[in-house]
Image: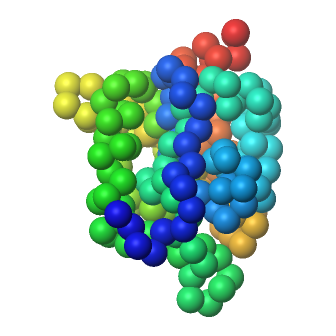
Amino acid sequence: MCCDMIGTPIVGNPIKSEIILIGQAPGIKEGDLKKPFAWTAGKNMFKWFSSIGLDEEKFRNNVYMSAVCRCYPGKNLSGTGDRVPSEIEIQNCSKWLNYEISTLKPKLIIPVGKLAISQFIEFIKLNDVVGKKFLYKNGNHAIDIVALPHPSGLSTWYKKTPGKKLLKNALNIIKNSQSWRSILEK
């Protein structure tokens, strides 16, 4: 049990998909709305996905949405954002994420934000990972990883150089993936 987490676990639609989107943890509004990426960060993220052909409804109906941690971690000490989950909290939730990946056997994972990205790729700066495709091995299963920055309203990284260009590159990689194209054709 995670003593510092707040509320009940928030999960996406239980759908079979070749794509898994993985966030850090739900925000405070997601608990009330009972779905991931339901507030400001989600609005920004769904604008990105709309720019490559999927509106929010079609995305939610065709892409499995998960998170590193399932409950709201609370505000950070400064009060200007959410607290990053602790290593223990991440470990406590890891069995769920590992199970989802092992069960769905996705062809594409889209980790959103530094914490989610770090579960698959070692890196120093977002510039090193956003806008590129990586190969991740889960047993005998190879999965493409295309990282995105966190779409928080507090973040300016994706709004200026080089983040703006790297985000566009990442979205183009996703758009050109076979898994994304198969959703567009539905």
Provide residue 166's location: percent of width, then percent of height: 62, 52
Is residue 142 in view?
A: no
The N terminus appears in which quarter of the rendering? Answer: bottom left
Q: Quadrant of residue 29?
A: bottom right
User: Which of the two residues, 71 or 124, is positioned nearer the viewer here?
Assistant: 71
Q: How many marks?
A: 0
Is residue 172 in view?
A: yes
User: Which of the two residues, 41 or 137, is positioned nearer the viewer here?
Assistant: 41
Residue drawn at (80%, 44%) of the image = 47
Rendering colour mode: rainbow
- Residue 60 falls left or right of residue 89: right
- Residue 143 falls left or right of residue 8: left
Residue drawn at (70%, 9%) of the image = 186
Q: Quadrant of residue 7?
A: bottom right
In the rendered image, the residue lying farthest to the top is: 186
Relative to residue 149, is residue 10 depicted above or below? above
Provide residue 143's location: percent of width, then percent of height: 36, 31
Provide residue 40's location: percent of width, then percent of height: 77, 59
In the rendered image, the residue lying farthest to the bottom is: 78
- Residue 23 falls left or right of residue 171: left
Residue drawn at (67%, 65%) of the image = 28
Relative to residue 108, is residue 22 depicted above or below? below
Provide residue 104's location: percent of width, then percent of height: 40, 24
In the rendered image, the residue lying farthest to the left is: 139
Residue drawn at (67%, 47%) of the image = 34
